[in-house]
Structures are given as structure tokens and as C-alpha cells.
Image: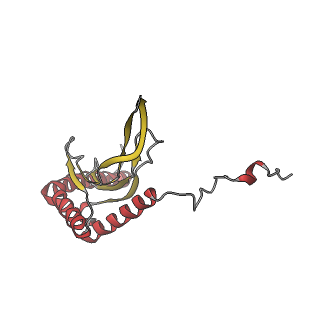
Amino acid sequence: MATESDTTNLQRKVERYKEVLGNTQRYREVWNAGLRKIIVEQLGLLAKATGLDAEIEERSEIENLEAVVFSLGHSESGLGEPVGGDLRRDLIKQNGSLVYQQLFNGKILVLINFPFIEKYGQPQPPKTIAIYRPEELKEPYFLRHLETFMADITAWEDYDDDVPEPNQRIGFKMNFETPEQ
């Protein structure tokens, strides 16, 4: 049988585990008691103050995995595919969104979903801004998150090759270079 001194380290781990489980319950209560509403209000105020046309949607398909989605909606992309004769089908563009997602442990994941045009390549994976305990998510953060979101979305919309990927080799020299011996 293990002695008390043998189980001290294990006891600390058990106490830490119980503390984390308690935090999960507390974080979920904070979300339900008003954090979700605060997120919606803050995003709405910032959209109104800046004239940004956005939709704010609360998603609650799964209890305790709820989300607030600040979406720029969708629109015609300007691209179209022929569907026969003189008909063409417009390709739809998802304009991007900023998401505040409650995680399984009650913490809040903030991420950016980039714009995406259907049938045109693969969508970029979401960009995680941060994961917060509910008490860490303060008013100034919403402004900072929206600034990051707008900078990233604008960069996506203004894509060009001014800054090529480091491994990208495009240009006339590529076919004429001789490998170094």
C-alpha cells in the first residue's frame, strides 16, 4: 500500500483536475448569465459606430458549445459558370466572419473565417485569434478583434503577388536556371 508521502504528488494532480472541472462549470455559467449578450452588444455597437454592414447571429445547436457569429454575409462573387445555352449561374462568395465559440471546457475561442468563393479553390482554414477564460474577455478586446478581422479580410480581398510565398518560384528565370553543381 502506498504511503501518504507517496501519494502527495498524485493528490495535487487530483485537486488540480477537480479545480479545472469546477472552472468549466463556472465558465459555462458566465456565458449563459450574460457574456454571450455582452459579445452581441459590443459587436453591434462597433458595427454601428463604423458603418460596417454585418449580421450578428447566435448559434446554439449544441448546449454549452454555443457561438456568436459576426458575419459579413454572402454575395454574388462576380464569377459565373455556364449552365447551358445563354444561362450562367453566379458563384456565391461567403464574405467572412468573426466567431466567438464556446469550447467544451467553457473557454471562448475567437477565430476568423476567411471569405470563400464556392467552386473556386479550397477555403483557407480559420485563423485562431485567441482562447480566453470568460473573465479575460474585456471590452477593448472586441475592438482589437474586429481590427484584426478587417485587416485580414481586406488583405484577402486585395490579394496579389506583391509578397510571394517563400517557396513560390514564378517567372521566366525558372525554366532557364541551371542547377548549381
- Please state which of residues 11 and 44 is positioned toward the viewer in this rendering: 44
Q: Which residue lies furthest to the left in this view?
A: 33
Instruction: State the residue in front, 131 or 25.
Output: 131
Residue drawn at 28 percent across, 51 percent down? 101
Asked if residue 5 can be seen in this view, the reply is: no
Q: Quadrant of residue 140?
A: bottom left
Q: In this view, does 116 lie to the left or right of 72?
A: right
User: x, y (%) of residue 14?
Assistant: 30, 51
> Furthest residue to the front?
86
Residue 177 shows in the view? yes
- From the viewer's perspective, is 10 left or right of 58? right
Query: In the image shown, does 67 or 159 lie closer to the viewer?
Result: 159
The image position of residue 19, as x and y in percent, is 26, 55
Say which residue appears at 45% left-offset and 48% top-offset. Answer: 124
> Vertically, is 49 above or below 161?
below
Q: Which residue lies furthest to the top in this view?
A: 84
Q: How many marks?
A: 0
Residue 139 falls left or right of residue 119? left
Residue at image x 23%, y 62%? Answer: 43
Q: Specify the quadrant of the image occupied by residue 92.
A: top left
User: Vertical placement of 49 versus 93: above or below?
Assistant: below
Q: Give how far across and how far down residue 175 sits, in percent.
A: 76, 48
Looking at the rendering, which quadrant does residue 88 occupy? Answer: top left
Indicate how the structure is coloured in the image.
secondary structure
Where is residue 82? Give x, y as percent: 43, 33
Quadrant of the image containing the N terminus: top left
